[in-house]
Amino acid sequence: MAAGVAHRRQVLYWRLLSRLFGAEEQPTLETASMAVVEELGLPATLLDPEVSVDNLVQRFPALAGELCDLMAAREHSGGDEVRRAALVSKLLLNVFATGSGTVTAGDLARWKKDAEWFERGMGCEPGGLRGPDGDAEVAGVLTTLEGDLVKRMRLREVLADPYLARQLTPSMSLIEQLLRDKSNLSGVALANAKALIRKYVDEVAEVLRTQVEQTSVGVIDRSVPPKRVFRNLDIERTIWKNLTNWSPEDQRLYVDRLFYRQTARRTTPAKLIVVVDQSGSMVDSMVNCTILASIFAGLPKVDVHLIAFDTRALDLTPWVHDPFEVLLRTDLGGGNDGHVAMNLARPKITDPRNTVMVWISDFYEVRTLITDFESVHRSGVKLIPVGSVNSSGRNSIDPWYRQKFKDLGTPVISGHIRKLVVELKNFLT
């Protein structure tokens, strides 16, 4: 019995591998797999990669529950293990066998839905794998696959057709491609591209704004006496400090002094200078940090400046409140020269102790730039080097610069953008 279970599982997984890595069907594996699926009482469409998981679940609703948490680690009996192998094969095939050739807007939309079912199978909510608690390695693979699908799409033709354009849902991969190609678009195609960028910016801004609001941090100003109001009363400290007044006879604690919590925060206006490498490898971080800069620009007593650079530097401060306009003015790609950005940023430092500089790059720069970073740091500026702040946390940072920043006491931030939110709120609020 055990040998039979193992054999049927092997058939399903060998068939999956042949489909993933080979362009042609293997008739023997297809026939054997069909026999296993029929024996399990599963629909034959389970083996058809052209049938989306959404379509499969609509036709066979009972499968929806089985697909959720399907790949979670747990014990399965023999028959269940074969059934699980068949369902896992469906999810993996639909997500990872993306084929070759031209991709339509419908193909991309279908793949995204299949990817959501894959995430459910991994025990996550749709989008959860790319969140802060997801699997960064798997999320990176999904991002790469989606990016490849977008690149294979005849995007200009899709954008020029209102019906096809409406089938597109914005994602980082799509936004990157739109930003790269925007100079080649006009008329209806350009209008549709702008609408998608605006929608994506608004969606990300809403998420980041919530994170900023929920991140309760900030430096307490100990020089300011606490306000003597009831909501600031420190009950635990008051009891502790008055324990000597405990009366055993009365069984009462007599309080002759009240203690209050200090709640005063920084009131000095702060300056935030965000410098963004707009080369292609940094697009995810650039989009996120451009939106984040606009959110902090809306806070009271925060003066935000935004600079983008490649081999030239561009001061985008006049548009910092509108990340959509900022992104339309960027020009992705090309090399990078951090010196031109530093030359534009340093004159903005007028009060080093109340200034934070966020420098977003992969730091594959000329190494003489480290002298400028050291000088800025010594002046009293809060320097925050950022390698990547994105959904997947994948990044490539020059190891030499990574070590230099660590030695300087300003380690490079990388991973989910919440890390940068905390750093900025600690300094600015």
Image (spheres, rainbow, N blue to C red):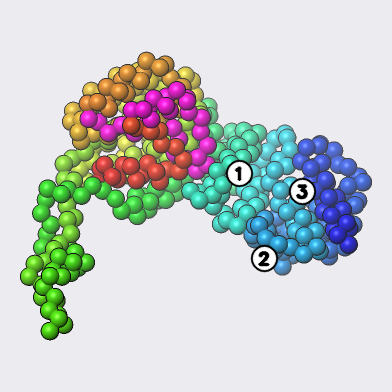
> Is the residue 243 above or below the residue 346 in the image?
below
Give neighbour class at mark 2: few <14, some 14-19, many 20+ (Cα, 10 Å): few
Is 104 situated above or below 118? above
Alpha-carbon span between mark 3 and mark 2: 20 Å
Magenta-highlighted residues: 380-408
Q: Which residue is mark 3?
A: 49
Most extreme residue toward the front is 248
Callout 2 touching callout 1 (CB < 8 Å): no
**Is 135 on the left or on the right of 50, as rendered?**
left
Tag 2 secondary structure: helix
Q: What's the CA distance linking mark 1 and mark 3? A: 21 Å
Residue 65: numbered disc: 2
Whether the magenta-drawn stretch holds residue 392 is answered as yes
Circle 2: residue type: Gly
Q: Is residue 19 or residue 229 the one in the foreground?
A: 229
Of the two numbered discs 2 and 1 in the rendering, the one whose residue sits closer to the viewer: 1
Left or right: residue 137 versus residue 191 is right
Quarter of the view holding residue 411 = top left
For badge 1, the amino acid type reads Val
Q: Secondary structure at mark 1?
A: helix
Name the residue: 52% across, 42% down.
392
Of residues 294 and 135, the one nearer the viewer is 135
Residue at 56 percent of width and 47 percent of height: 135
Q: Which residue position is annotated with label 1? A: 138
In reply to whether residue 69 is colored magenta, the answer given is: no
Say which of 71 and 411 sits in front: 411
